[in-house]
Image: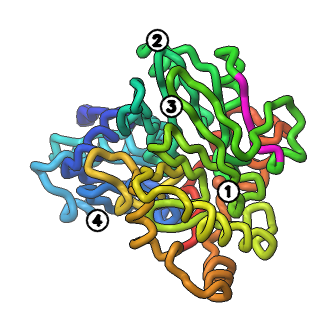
Amino acid sequence: MSEQAAVKTVTVKELTKKILNHEEVFILDARNTDDFDDWKIEGKNVHIINAPYFDLLEGVDSIVDKLHKNTAIYVVCAKGGSSEFVAEQIAEAGFTNVYSVEGGMKAYSEHLEPIKIGDLKNGGAIYQFVRIGKGCLSYLVESQGTGAMIDTNRMLEPYEEHINEHNIKLTHVLDTHLHADHISGGRRLAENHGATYFLPPKDAEEVIFDFTPINDGDEYNVGETTIKAIYSPGHTIGSTSFLVDDQYLLTGDILFIDSIGRPDLAGKAEDWVGDLRKTLYHRYKDLPDEQLVLPAHYMGINEMNDDGSISEKLGTLYKENHGLNIGDEADFRKTVTENLPPQPNSYQEIRETNMGKIAPDEEKQREMEIGPNRCAVR
Ligand SMILES: [Fe+2]
């Protein structure tokens, strides 16, 4: 019997770095085709093929002509088990540069990469945490050693690491709305740091824990920085945006780079589409064009800047984002209510978890979040 060929592994952090640096990355995804079609690794220079594990049990002859001897091959599966097997098969077929992605798509879905967006005018900076496997974006505003976190994801380690490294005293944890596509880690993060957890009250009617309500016009002082709340309903009835020092506009799931928020995830599309219209065509319109829009999600790599961050000037979006350029209100209503993508996986359970009504264990929470985010309508 031949000895098992040596297979190297790569962490999702290392893989993410390569993708964000726009390196050429060749991926073999060994999940079944339905899962692959639903959601997969993307990047500017990512080349990906799907070859389900089940088709490779007898060997990899059927795919060798798609592989290149000199290019690194990254094999990914759901959890990192079958990818190891497939990578071994490929190595046995004579390929030397083969890696199995540790933890698979599950780990990829949970990875967060912090990227500095820019400085604040009175000192300090704003960071965007890119959840590359799911398209979720969260933000840390830091000034004079004090910090505010916005739209915290479930995995707290990457934030904790950053907060420790930068010696930040976290005072405010804010959610722009009650999320339906990912589980908020906001309340836990606030508890860990003795910070105050804020939620828009109109999204929180069924929330069963204590929180501090966010009202239109409220201002939060974080070091020398001011974060101002702007009520901006439409994706949810409570959706609130945050203006950081009149420089950055955190839009939550109301306005994205290449799309706008969907109004239907609480079953009220017809009611909320009018609010969405008002927010996008009136409320935001009054803000200066120079604001840098920082959304809570992105949908595709076409929205990504060269450094891997996601942002665009408000004025540019008013020129280029189709959702901001539908002159006729009836057309807008039609576009928004008739082009809705499928709803996010487990979105009802995720909403209930974010309300504190149910408390699934960690494994279940992971499963609930698997898949792409679907907060937008184009
Ligand atoms: Fe959302």
Q: Residues within 10 Å of mark 3 (few under 14, many from 20)?
A: many
Q: CA distance from mark 4 to mark 3?
A: 47 Å
Tell me which image quadrant ligand 1 sits in: bottom right
First in residue order: circle 2 vs circle 4? 4
Please give the name of the residue rendered at 35% of the width and 63% of the height, measured from the top-left corner: 302
Q: Residue 323, percent across and down?
A: 53, 74
Q: Give whichever of discs 3 and 1 has the lower sequence position.
A: 3
Q: In the image, what residue type sits under mark 4?
A: Ser
Q: Quadrant of residue 229?
A: top right
Q: Nearer the viewer, residue 18 or 97?
A: 18
Give, as a three-letter code, the residue at label 1.
Ser
Q: Can residue 54 be seen?
A: no
Q: CA distance from mark 2 to mark 3?
A: 13 Å
- Give the secondary structure at mark 3: strand
Q: Is residue 95 above or below residue 119?
A: below
Which residue is denoted by mark 4 in the rendering?
62
Q: Could you tell me the amino acid type at mark 2?
A: Asn
Label disc, if present, on residue 140 of the rendered structure: 3
In this picture, which residue range is highlighted in magenta?
A: 196-201
Q: CA distance from mark 1 to mark 2?
A: 33 Å
Image quarter where the N terminus lies is: top left
